[in-house]
Amino acid sequence: MMHSTLLSSNSPGLRRDEFLAGDLSAVHELACRLKAASLAGRAGDRPLAGKNIALLRMQPGDAEMSVLHRAALDLGARVAHVRLGPPIDPGGTQFRHLSQMLGRLYDAIDCSSLTPAEVRQIEQHAGVPVYDDLEGIDHPAWVLADLMTLHEHGRTAGPDAQIAVLGDHAAEHSENHRFALQAMLLTTMGGT
């Protein structure tokens, strides 16, 4: 059964398999408003100022800033790349303590390259929004960016559509992805 994590008080993060159409519609509308404000030169608002976001990764961060990192910085958040050490049993007390510590240090945590069980354990014990790889190509943020790009070019996608953004529109898609990520962060971190 699918349920919403955008509006649920007991599950504040965003997992790729737990969205309702209404949630995505609200996030899509917010992403479009953020883009319109940016294009109009009104993007100076920093609603996540003072918030700390951890990008939990198995490998060190790339030299190039990720789209999620840039999206969070643009909203005023501080972003830390946290590299995981050796694997820890997600059911053990050490993993629980790690999750609790991360929740005390950060206002939100994005988990990349972790198993769904590990993400759920972190979410259960951290007490802050926990995201399951917001930047992943199979995350709803990617789909929202696709839909924004299509809509801006007067196109629509049917339920079985497969989308590939190539050439000149790839940069536009990347910008739309940034706005979709910002909308998701604002929705779950209380910045709206």
Image: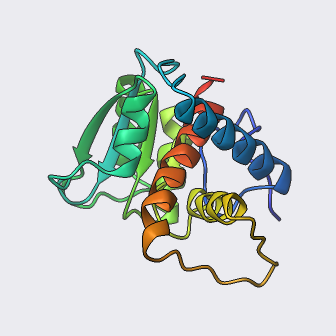
Which residue is more in the foreground, 63 or 150?
A: 150
The quadrant of the image that shows the N terminus is bottom right
Which residue is more in the foreground, 190 or 127?
A: 190
Where in the figure is residue 109, as x and y percent of width and height? Answer: 43, 40
The quadrant of the image that shows the C terminus is top right
**Residue 150's image quarter?**
bottom right
Residue 132 visible in the current orientation = no
- 131 vs 56, left or right, is right
- 100 vs 190, left or right, is left
Return the residue found at the far top. 50
Which residue is drawn at the image coordinates 41% and 42% (left, top)? 96
* Colouring chosen for the image of the structure: rainbow
Which residue is drawn at the image coordinates 20% and 52% (left, top)? 64
Where in the figure is residue 139, as x and y percent of width and height? Answer: 57, 63
Reply above or below: 39 against 49: below
Which residue is drawn at the image coordinates 61% and 49% (left, top)? 14
